[in-house]
Amino acid sequence: MTENELYYAIGNIDDDLIIEAMEYEPTRNKNIRYINKFIAIAACFIIVGIIINITEEDVVNVNDMEHIINSYSMPLDDYIESNEYSQNDNIVKIFSEESMVKYLGINQIPKILSKGVVLSDQNTYRIIENSEGQVIHDNFEIIYTDYDKKFVTINLSKSGKNYGDMFNSIDNLKVSEIKDVFVTIGKFGETEFGAEFKNDIYYTINSEGVNEKEFISILENIINSQK
Amino acid sequence: MDDNKIIDLYWNREECAINATDEKYGRYLMKIAMNILCRYEDSEECVNDTYLDTWNQIPPTRPKYLLPYIGRITRNKSIGKLKYLTADKRNCEMNILMSELEDCFISYNTPESIYDNKEIGTTISDFLRTCKKEYRYIFIRRYWFSDSIADISEQLEMSQSKIKSILFRIRNKLRKYLEKEGYLI
């Protein structure tokens, strides 16, 4: 079966499911959303962290982001949005892993992030150029998973187009230092973590199903892989 | 107007059935077509063809639900039109959407050369009923309505990477489910 045949087949799913999707109302509460944002910002003002780098040991600070998980949507990627809809004006180029690594100027991408969490076989690496051949989107998404509960995505970008989205509504973030690299880390509940850092290129990392210790270990692994 | 009344208008061969359909569902149909084709003129043509097909099919067909019935016609017409328009060029959004599904079925092989889409549609429905309502919504919005990930993330106020991760997991579960049901060998 090709992807086209599957796409057609999905067209034949039962009517009641389509009606349900039509009528589904996501739960939103704008007041709670604003209150939560206010609390988040106020809390960040109160908890002003001072980074002390006395020794060469890593300094790990994990920002608690749980209070904004259901109220904060990250800014949409303008470039993706416009390119997805401008049809044939832009060119989507599919990269191999090798060509992506070469483009980004990094050593390699790790095959394993932690025990059982391996490079997915479903990764597709793309770059988008405009009609003049200029790169307008270079956010490569690399998925790692244990094919069960654990899921880690690493977004790599040379241009840093979307860098900073994850924490941009939070003031006074505490920053960590891992293997001499400054990393901003946040947690959303006990099993979802996010991190951003720049190490020649821009890294944005999201995880689900891994605990804090494992996530920090994954960050170390990623940073080490570029040394 | 109630769907049954609109269907009655078709049934009684009253031309205002088309206006009533357009008034109630025209925007939805345009969105489905635009999500696939991204061009207003082509989408409008598909929606108009949908009305003509509906007019020709009712009667004798009497659908239980009108929107899925006409939405399916628009969807199929739009895919057909897209194939025609993009023999050598591809639509960015559909390119991404199709490649997601391609990932899901990379190892597919079956002894039968002709596949019954309706049968697999029922199997996919059975699978979707086992998923959380919110996950089911995301899957159907993405692969039935062909909504972009950006649109879905805005509707649900979730990040795009969260939507992608949910879709990734549903696709994996779907693959396992179809393997279990004997569709993937």
Image (cartoon, coloured by chain):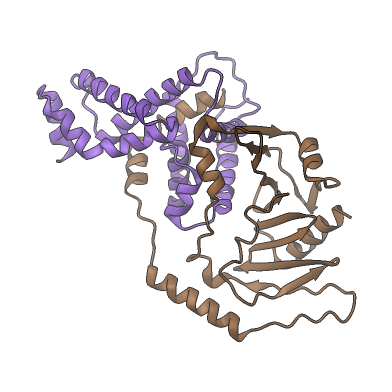
Chain colours: A brown, B purple
The quarter of the picture where the C terminus of chain B appears is top right
Observer able to see residue A162: yes
Observer able to see residue B65: no
> Residue A24, percent across and down?
35, 51
Q: Is residue A157 above or below residue B32?
A: below
Asked whether, in this view, residue A201 is left or right of residue B18, the answer is: right
Tell which of A82 and B105 is nearer to you: A82
Q: Is residue A129 above or below residue A182?
A: above
Q: Is residue B80 above or below residue B141?
A: above
**Total labels drawn:** 0
> Which residue is depicted at the point 35% across and 27% down?
B41
Q: Residue farthest to the bottom?
A: A46
Displayed quadrant of residue B70:
top left
> Residue A93, percent across and down?
66, 32
> Residue A23, percent across and down?
32, 48
Displayed quadrant of residue A208:
bottom right
> Which residue is depicted at the point 65% across and 73% down?
A63
Tell which of A206 and B124 is nearer to you: A206
> Which residue is depicted at the point 56% across and 53% down?
B162
Asked whether, in this view, residue B60 is left or right of residue B105, the answer is: left
The quarter of the picture where the N terminus of chain B appears is top left
Displayed quadrant of residue B48:
top left
> Which residue is depicted at the point 78% across and 41% down?
A103
Asked whether, in this view, residue A40 is left or right of residue A112, the answer is: left
> Residue A94, percent across and down?
68, 33
Q: Residue farthest to the top?
A: B113
